[in-house]
Amino acid sequence: MKKYLVAFAFSLGVMSCTPKKENTIAINVLLIPSQEMYSQALALNSVINQNNPETIKLDENHVPHITLLQCFINENDLPKVNEALEGLYKTIAQDSLKAKSLFYDEDKEKSFAMVRVEKSAPLLEIHKKVIELVKPFIVKNGSEVSFVQNPDGSSISESTVEYVPEFVEKYSYKNFDPHISLGVAQNRILDSLAENIFKPIQFKAESVSVYQLGDHGTAQKLLWKSE
């Protein structure tokens, strides 16, 4: 009996020493635009979505946003990431941001559209600061399961999975292109939106937030929001 108890105790010890597998999640550290810009993005996307129901649909689960950083982190490090970002919002809270233009490839019949935001000094500075603060927690071993899964069960697109770990190297600093994604539509629709609905306005950031990414870079699951 004694040897069985020893063997059982040993097996428990081995099990307790086995390192737990860490889940990797894809996150987006972003700015939520204030109400006028937020509403305009929803209005533009609504028309785009009517033209092309297969493209992204902005709503409370796919929020309009300006990406500051996309990356993979270990889920266990999320509280540390949130703590590192604490207080960062106050550095941009009073700064005015500008929606410059409705940008799309005018040479195509159908194009991806975005609201291009002016790369102002405060916006570039907070982008750099976010990378500096989160960089110690960035990992490269993310995969399709790191994202909020598609409701229809379809796979997360390969381009989405590949984009995230390349964000700092390829899409940051001098390559940083602040914008609000709107989706894909026929250019005749986008021409009409540019002329009749889009307004180049000044706006502010409502918050710095961390979301778990969904397919096509959508901000889907709120993980943390600045106070």
Image: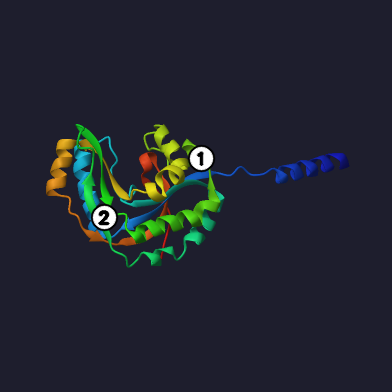
Q: Nearer the viewer, residue 222 or 31?
A: 31
Q: Mark 1: which amino acid?
A: Gly
Q: Would you say 3 lies left or right of 128 here?
A: right
Name which residue lies at 83% across and 43% down.
Answer: 5
In this view, the residue in front, 120 or 71, is 120
- From where the camera sits, is residue 27 visible? no
Q: Position of residue 222 (x, y in %)?
A: 41, 53
Measured along the vertical axis of the image, is residue 67 above or below residue 154? below
Q: Is residue 142 left or right of residue 188?
A: right
> Which numbered circle lies on residue 38?
2
* Image mark for residue 211: none
Amino acid of disc 2: Tyr
For the residue carrying disc 1, how many other residues have a C-alpha within 10 Å: few (<14), some (14-19), or many (20+)? many
Mark 2 residue element? helix
Q: Which residue has dot 1 on it?
A: 142
Q: Disc 2 and disc 1: Cα gap in Å?
A: 30 Å
Count of numbered badges drawn on the protein: 2
Q: Residue at x 36, y 61 (%)?
A: 122
Residue in view at x 52 percent, y 52 percent:
135
Quarter of the N terminus within the rendering:
top right
Q: Position of residue 166 (x, y in %)?
A: 45, 41
Callout 2 touching callout 1 (CB < 8 Å): no
Quarter of the image for residue 216 reads top left
Q: Position of residue 91 (x, y in %)?
A: 39, 66
Relative side of 122 to 18, left or right: left
In the current view of this chain or complex, which residue is farthest to the front?
A: 174
Task: Please provide percent x and percent y for residue 12.
Answer: 75, 44
Q: Is residue 137 visible?
A: yes
Quadrant (top left, top right, bottom left, bottom right) of the C terminus: bottom left
